[in-house]
Amino acid sequence: IRQQALAELQQASSTTALAEWHGRYLGRRGELTQLMRRISQVPPEERPAYGQAVNALKEELTARFEQREAEVKRSELSQRLAAEAVDVTLPGRPADVAGLHPVTQMIREVTTIFNHLGFQTVEGPEVEYGYYAFDALNIPQDHPARDVWDTIFIVSDQKEIVLRPHTSPMQIRTMERRQPPVRVVVPGRCYRFEAVDATHEWHFHQIEGLAVDEHITMADLKGTLAEFARQLFGQERKVRFRCDYFPFVEPGVDFAIDCMFCRGEGCRVCKGTGWIEILGAGMVHPQVLRNVGYDPERYTGWAFGMGVERLVMLKYGVPDIRLFYQGDLRFLAQFNRAL
Ligand code: PHE
């Protein structure tokens, strides 16, 4: 028994195996207990020696068990420590970090440029009265240009309420509240009742600009927009003004930069013209000044309005405006490389 017990004890290499071993030899029904019981079958004169021998064996096995138990516990612990070890020198796994939407980034970039040129950022309502969206901007009820802005109507009675189709209503709201000099930029969401395709969304963003004071001229407009275009699209940009029509400016212009993607004839961005139109602008119409109670004999001003998504598309070569609102992180994450 001794031989076998000791051999098995050596084999037992886990806490559970040890517990089994203990039950088998030293437990209440174990071998040793049974040996002790068999003392009645031993001739009386041999009993003291037999008893001593069994007790000695029991003591030995108990001592060896405790020794082995300590050994097994130690090795189990060191195995666990090795398995659960943390290598503190490994580089960390990068955590997912949120970033700003490219439209938000562009709004900040553009408004910052104008802030540095002395323009204050203001914001206005997306749900707007027809009066501010059209009438006060010199686009009366029956004006043919009124449906250039494919408008989403909330209420279409006498007191029209619309989702603003441009940020220009804030020209009126700003001038109603302030006296010249006025210099503001107005970022914000706009809405149009439009079929969605690669270059049109029914929901998009614009940034409006307005400067009104004594002696403000078209030259100031040209210089300001040229400086803006160069800060946003590169110091080497050439700029172009051409006549355009908007009811609330006179004269009206479209403002273009030379194409920075240009591969001549085949250029897809500028269609081979060499020029990319980036915004509409013009001298504030005298009627608009009158509508807000400004004296057009004393004050002049200019305004501009640009589409933010379009700026991002031009600056980064985004081919489809629908990408902005699909929430696809493969697209959005590209604008947050620094994170
Ligand atoms: N509001 C015009 C548009 O949405 C842009 C514009 C703004 C044009 C200011 C001239 C002056 O198309």
Image (cartoon, helix red, strand yellow):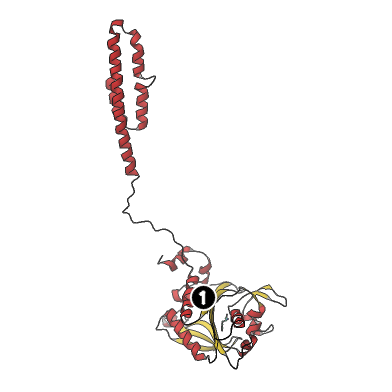
Residue at the bottom extreme of this rendering:
297
Q: Is residue 2 above or below residue 235?
A: above
Residue 84 % position (x, y): 35, 45
The quarter of the picture where the C terminus appears is bottom left
Residue 252 visible? The answer is no
Question: What residue would you read off at disc 1?
Answer: 308
Residue at the front extreme of this rendering:
179
Question: Who's the residue at 32% across and 34% down the image?
Answer: 73
Residue 160 % position (x, y): 69, 76
Total numbered labels: 1
Q: Nearer the viewer, residue 237 or 6?
A: 6
Q: Quadrant of residue 294?
A: bottom right
Q: Is mark 1 within 8 Å of ligand 1?
A: no
Question: Who's the residue at 36% across and 22% down the image?
Answer: 24
Q: Is residue 226 above or below residue 75?
A: below
Question: Who's the residue at 28% across and 20% down the image?
Answer: 2
Disc 1 residue type?
Answer: Val
Which element is circle 1 on? helix
Q: Nearer the viewer, residue 296 or 29?
A: 296
